[in-house]
Image (tube, rainbow, N blue to C red):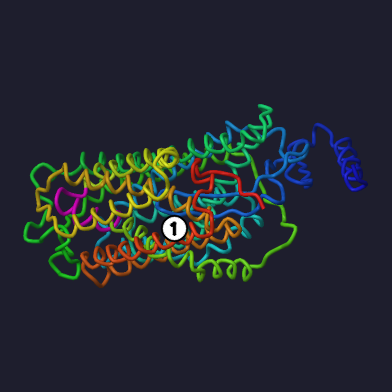
Amino acid sequence: MDETENGDEARTATLKKDIGPAQQGVTTLNIMANGFQRARGGKYYGGLNNRNLQASTSFQGSQVTVVTESPKPTPRAADDHLPPIKTHLALSISNLLVYTSYNGIQNIQSSINDKDDLGIFTLATVYTTVFLLAPFATIVIRKFGCKNLLLLSWASMGLFAGANFYPRFSTLIPASFLIGACGTCIGVINNIYLAAASDRYIKNKKLGSEKRHQILSIFFGAFFTFFEASQISGNLTSSLVLFTNSPGSADNATFDHTTPCGADMCYLNSTASSHIKRPSQDTLYMLFGIFLGCVALGFLVSLFLLPRLRLPEPAVPRSVCQEMMSCFKVLVSLEFALLLPAVMGQAMMVMVIFTGYTSVFITCSLGVEWVGFVMMAYGTSTAIFATLANYLARYLGRIFLFLTFILLDTGLLFTMLFWNPGHDGSKLILFSIAGAAGISEGISQAQFSSIISIVFQKDLPPALVTYNMTKCIAFSASLAISTFACFYYRLYIAIALYIVGLFGYIGLEILVNKRGTKRNKADQKPLLRDVRS
């Protein structure tokens, strides 16, 4: 042990001796060595050291991913008092409650706020803000702390639910901007907590370093099961409330039968813009009140059960300009250029489902009260295949799964292009399309993470940030197109991107094969793994 460590221990012992029991819970000693350490009576917890700083957000409605470097265990690398299981459950339950509200509201925005495309502009504001502010996420988290920002994020979700009581551009757009600003941090914060909790669990159980990958997979897998389940709970809530309080649900009285449904429906047509009879105000008040209550419960769970966690300052500080330049270098690389069309095609497919399929297929054909029921099929299949994809990759391989979701999505886009559900559409087909789209979404999340982790192993954090920003660009572009072009144009664009993306992906695999990384061992394991420098 060198002089610096001896000095640190001496100062720590002196400070602990001076703090009496009455001062516990008031004085916080934030002593940083290789990681986080909790002083007596302190408030900050953690299990990451200075090398474990790089984190990245992945935003898809409902799913996020972080990859961190693995710290070497030291006596001061983790807090002895961090409760890993309690932390995991508190984080998972709070995300389930809050995203039950957000997903439930998001999926009916384009249906209940179709006047002047308010719902479309609302969602576009969210994703555009995420794209613009993504490079600032790590800096902001380090400045204000994980728990403080997570609570602020939950408060912004509550503000968004409240703004829907009085849906106007002056209320929904500012609330959407705040959600987007906080959304750049939520994914990073969630994954920092999960990484710290899993590392603490490993140390508590005295497991070897070879078990870290397994424990990380379990912690992350369980968390994303809760997270993806929010699609089910949010959609179920909205449909139960709207269906129960919809007097016209039994006799199709809510529909304008002169307006075609499906891809032929065009919001630019004045008659199409009034195809939906908006649910009664009392019904919407009840629905948004329930969603607001879910956010409040999630906020309280985080407030009282989550420990505080703060990122230490990096050994070599990086400016915002440096963060943006690292992302730009990834964006202009040949490898990312080959992957780009597929990334944007998949992101546009998600927006087609959330803001087009829900409106011109489900709402037009069956009524807005059926949106939640049909989208439950999407949420269920996404949750199942997001978990299974890691294990299927062991036996089927990345290439097979990658081609599967591209071809499946392309087939669904052609189906939506040529199938007209009419005003009494087949529920079986509507549920099947949503379920198949969820399967594709669950597979694509894992496969994009896999290929990016392999190709950009040396520049992984900026690569994942660039991936997230690119998806947000596609989200916003798809929503913007819907304000001045008919729905079928969005289908054509997504199909074209997937066709180009298919050839681009094949070219990328050929390039990876030439560089000798095609048979990387990481491709045969679950995707959550350590990234060592």
Question: Which residue is the site of mark 1?
Answer: 509
Callout 1 secondary element: helix
Q: Residue at horizontal 66%, vertical 57%?
A: 143
User: Where, by quadrant of the figure, is residue 140 drawn?
Assistant: bottom right
Name the residue nearer the viewer: 207 or 42. 207
Name the residue nearer the viewer: 61 or 513. 513
Q: Is residue 88 toward the left or the right of residue 352 in the image?
A: right
Q: Residue at horizontal 59%, vertical 70%?
A: 325
Q: Where is residue 245 in the image (x, y as percent from the top left)?
A: 20, 42
Q: Is residue 185 toward the left or the right of residue 107 in the image?
A: right
Q: Residues within 10 Å of mark 1 (few under 14, many from 20)?
A: many
Determine if the magenta segment contains residue 366. Answer: yes
Q: Position of residue 278 (x, y in %)?
A: 20, 54
Q: Where is residue 466 in the image (x, y as percent from the top left)?
A: 51, 63
Q: Can residue 423 be seen in this view?
A: yes
Q: Is residue 308 toward the left or the right of residue 300 in the image?
A: right
Magenta stretch, residue numbers = 353-368
Q: Where is residue 56 in the image (x, y as percent from the top left)?
A: 55, 55
Determine if the magenta segment contains residue 37. Answer: no
Q: Residue at horizontal 37%, vertical 41%?
A: 385
Can you say whether 213 is above or below 402 in the image?
Answer: above
Q: Is residue 335 toward the left or the right of residue 350 in the image?
A: right
Which quarter of the image is occupied by the N terminus?
top right
Name the residue nearer the viewer: 83 or 411. 411
Q: Can residue 475 be seen in this view?
A: no
Query: Going by the picture, which residue comes out furthest to the top?
Result: 205
Query: Going by the picture, which residue comes out furthest to the right?
Result: 3
Counting labels gives: 1
User: Where, by quadrant of the figure, is residue 369 drawn?
Assistant: top left
Identity of the amino acid at label 1?
Glu
Magenta span: chief secondary structure: helix
